[in-house]
Amino acid sequence: MHKALKIARVMLSVYYAYMVEYRAELVFWVLSGTFPLILMGLWVEAAQGDRFNLTPTELVQYFLAVFLVRQFTVVWVIWEFEREVVEGRLSSYLLQPVDPAWRHFFSHVSERFARLPFAFLLVGLFLLLYPYAAWLPRLDNLLLGLLATALAFCLRFLMQYTFALAAFWIERASALEQFWFLPYTFLSGMVAPLALFPDAVRAAVLWTPFPYLIYFPASLLINRPDHVAQGFAAMVLWSALFWGLNRWLWRQGLRQYSGMGA
Amino acid sequence: MERYLKVLRLFWGTAIAAELEYRLNFIITALISLGGLVGSLFGLFLFYRTGYQFAGWSWEEALLVLGLFTVLQGFSTTLLIPNLNKIVTQVQQGTLDFVLLKPISSQFWLSTRVISPWGLPDVLFGLVMIGYSGDRLGLTWADYGLALLPLTFGAITLYSLWFMLGATSIWFVKIYNVTEVLRGLLEAGRFPIAAYPAAYRVFFTFVVPVAFLTTVPAQTMLHQGGRGWLLASALLAIVLALLANRFWRFALRFYTSASS
């Protein structure tokens, strides 16, 4: 236990140092996630006529929360893992007594801390544009929202890492992520809060993992909790499912791995 | 001029031959485009399903904008991404030297060296969408033809912006993802510009000219908006194209090569 904590601390500080070295790059990654902010404009304009059952204020808050949650759950492990397998660099990591997954995990986590200031700066900018929407989450909602965001990140990481393991068998595993990204974009609540979906679609979507990645944490953060216990249960279940699949694929994949090019 | 055409034919011939080795890729990208199309339609439908309309844009007219966006997306996958996003690698590895030594314009070489057919599904789906909504709106071939003009200007504008951002890698090698910011902002072009609040409209017209990429061509097709927009779009394309060329020459003065 003590050793695990030490490894975690070392990895976090190493990757944090690595991330802040490329601050300009980071700023651009933050700025490239403006999709929710664009949709915010559309929905605020649309909600002016009271035709949708959400007010402009609620929509601004929702999309700012979506933007933040999205910033904290960005995952790119599949591209790195795919390269490591195709170029055979995975071999040297396999010799170390730590599962290579943790290396990726901590590099993502430490990047969150480096990203934090820029993301909040951008949210501040939009609050200047819509000052009436400024809000503070209630303490319990805030804590639950942060927990949900952390879980959403873990789930998304786990899912993408599971797809990444396909790299042992196929050359372009990232195509799987490109597929997966489509329902993630359109069903996670990034284009509109789930309250604005047609009822049948919403009911169906709640059975998929997508709304728990964005909509669920975001609605907690704006003080509109929605079936909290169910949401957490769904996240844990999906995580368990992908964890099992992931470990199984990992064991099968290692047998398949030939260390090409190394 | 003739020499350039010949070179272009050779460039694209070899590029397509190389890409066709990965035929499975074509099916994958076609499926991804189809999925993206369904998603975009769903996104648009969420606005229109309660009877709300983007100010002055019916469902079919909004589909027209989405179709034009999809076509431009295909254009950038075919030409812009495979070429312009590689400028940074050339700078980083110093292989830009070889490009500069060749007896043709380096901007031409960098912008046209490869072509990737993987954008074609998007172009195709976009055209189908335009055809469908144009048919329901009773558009004629003359209307489509007229819209080719602003669409070409839009493509030139897009190329010039992309190229200039790519050229900044001469100074800042580590910002290869700056074009991702542009791509993120271009997403706004999925919807007619009238659908945005005033502050957004100003930003997407004057700062990042998204309005000229999809909304203006759609308006031209529908005979709305007047000639002023068409003129502005031509002017913008010409100015940006000239600027891109100047900017590239200026940037080259600061190029100091690497690892040679």
Image: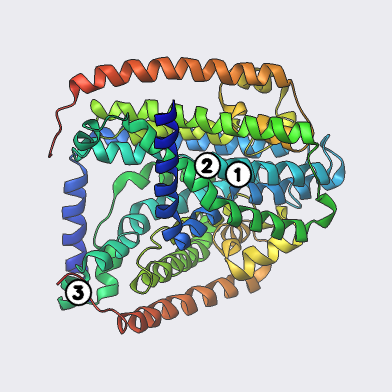
Residue A213, x across and y down, in percent: 58, 31
Are dots 3 and 2 in contact, CB under 8 Å?
no
Which amino acid is tagged 2? Met
**Residue at x 58% of width, y 41% of height:** A70
Q: Are marks 3 and 2 on the same chain?
A: yes
Q: Is residue A124 left or right of residue A177?
A: right
In 3D space, how far apart are the residues under numbered discs 3 and 2 (Cα atoms)?
Answer: 36 Å
The residue tagged 3 is B2
Q: How many marks do you count on the picture?
A: 3
Residue A79's disc is none
Residue A232, x across and y down, in percent: 64, 20
Residue at disc 3, secondary structure: helix
The residue tagged 1 is B63
Residue A252, x across and y down, in percent: 25, 17
Which amino acid is tagged 1? Leu
Which amino acid is tagged 3? Glu
Q: Is residue B8 left or right of residue A10?
A: left
Residue at disc 2, secondary structure: helix
State whether residue B136 is above or below residue B107: above
Q: Earlier in the sequence, mark 1 or mark 3?
A: 3
Would you call the spot at circle 2 few (<14 residues within 10 Å), some (14-19), or many (20 or more)? many
